[in-house]
Image (tube, rainbow, N blue to C red):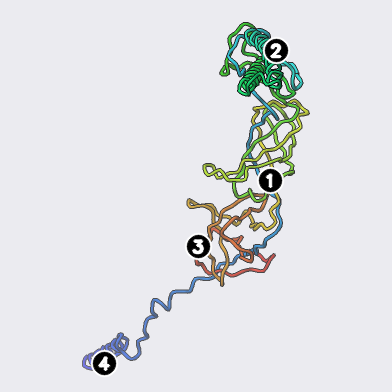
Amino acid sequence: MRTALAVSGVALATVALIAFLSLRPNGAQVTAAPSASGAKASTPAISVQVVPVAAEAFEVSVPATGTLRARESVELVSELSRRLIKVRAVEGASVKKGDVLFELDVADVQAEIARLEVQTRLAETTLKRQKSLSAEGLSTEAELETAQAKLDELYAERRVRGVTLSKSQIKAPFAGVIGLRHVSEGAWVSPSTPLATLHDTRALKLDFTLPERYASLLQNGQRFRFTVEGRSGAEHGTIRAFEPAIDPGSRSVVVRGEVDNVHGLLPGAFARVELPLKVEQALLVPAIAVVPGADGRRVFVEQGGAARSVSIEVGARTADRVQALSGLAAGDRVITTNLLRLKDGARVRVLPAGAAK
């Protein structure tokens, strides 16, 4: 009995050993493990929606800052160094062109003119006598020429004194309003002495600057609106001229507008300008598609089933769109959804318009 049990145990052990050896990796019945490359699943494409870029007419309101200036403005000075004997200018008063505002002491000039008048009459008599003697052959040609030259010299000196006399009256060069006066009667004035200011404020000029990218859109006659500190309402003006060159320092163009001063605006005031400009071929993209970054702004463009990161320069904005000044072309398909999941080169699948994102 014991011998039979021992034989049975050996038989069972033999069967178990044969089964174990048959399951080793080198055995015929061992199944190979799957490779790592086969186990790795391919990355699925990201579902996105796109908006095609098209060139279209677009009106942009360009902001700018500027300064109001009087239509005409001048600091009155004397051309002569003389004593001031009469002040007719009244601060804040309106004057007409040609009104006398200041008078200088020219008593010595008037005396000189009187002396020259006497000498001129004598020279005229002498010349007349020389002509009579020359006609009778009693005077030489040289004596006649000397008399004529003396009279011409006296005429010239009288004209010089007349110019000095005219400069003794400082007149208004244009109609306007007298500003603050800086001198009083009896003061000694010279060409470096400011007497007063004169401003024509019936109309004003408004000078402001625009970025150079808008220079080609400027035209004389364009209307604009502006506001100034201390006034709630908006004023309006018209572009009259602009510099035909770009300032290399600020990369901007200087624009001059004209403003009808019906509300008593003051020259020198700071103005905030809004100038509407029409861009005939503007590329607009949805504002939501623009991704800001440390190196500027970018958008993702769908190309051949992949997302491509494109750097753009932005211009004007509306409530929901942005003007792309560079980086894009008409026909590009800008991605507008799943932007946070995208990176350059990522596979994308374009959904039909209106499909669930």
Q: Earlier in the sequence, mark 1 or mark 3?
A: 1
Q: Earlier in the sequence, mark 2 or mark 1?
A: 1
* CA separation in Å, label 2 and label 1: 74 Å
* CA separation in Å, label 4 and label 1: 99 Å
Q: Which residue is mark 2?
A: 121
Residue visible at 57% across and 64% down in the picture: 301
Q: Using the image, tell me which numbered label, if any, was put on residue 11.
A: 4
Q: Is residue 13 visible?
A: yes
Q: Is residue 159 visible?
A: no
* CA separation in Å, label 4 and label 2: 167 Å
Q: Nearer the viewer, residue 13 or 270?
A: 270
Q: Is residue 241 above or below residue 36?
A: above
Q: Nearer the viewer, residue 279 or 350?
A: 279
Q: Which residue is mark 3?
A: 343
Residues packed near mark 4 inside 10 Å, few (<14), some (14 to 19) or many (20 plus)? few
Q: Quadrant of the N terminus?
A: bottom left
The x and y percentages for residue 334 are 61, 62
**Nearer the camera: disc 2 or disc 3:** 2
SS at mark 4 in the image: helix
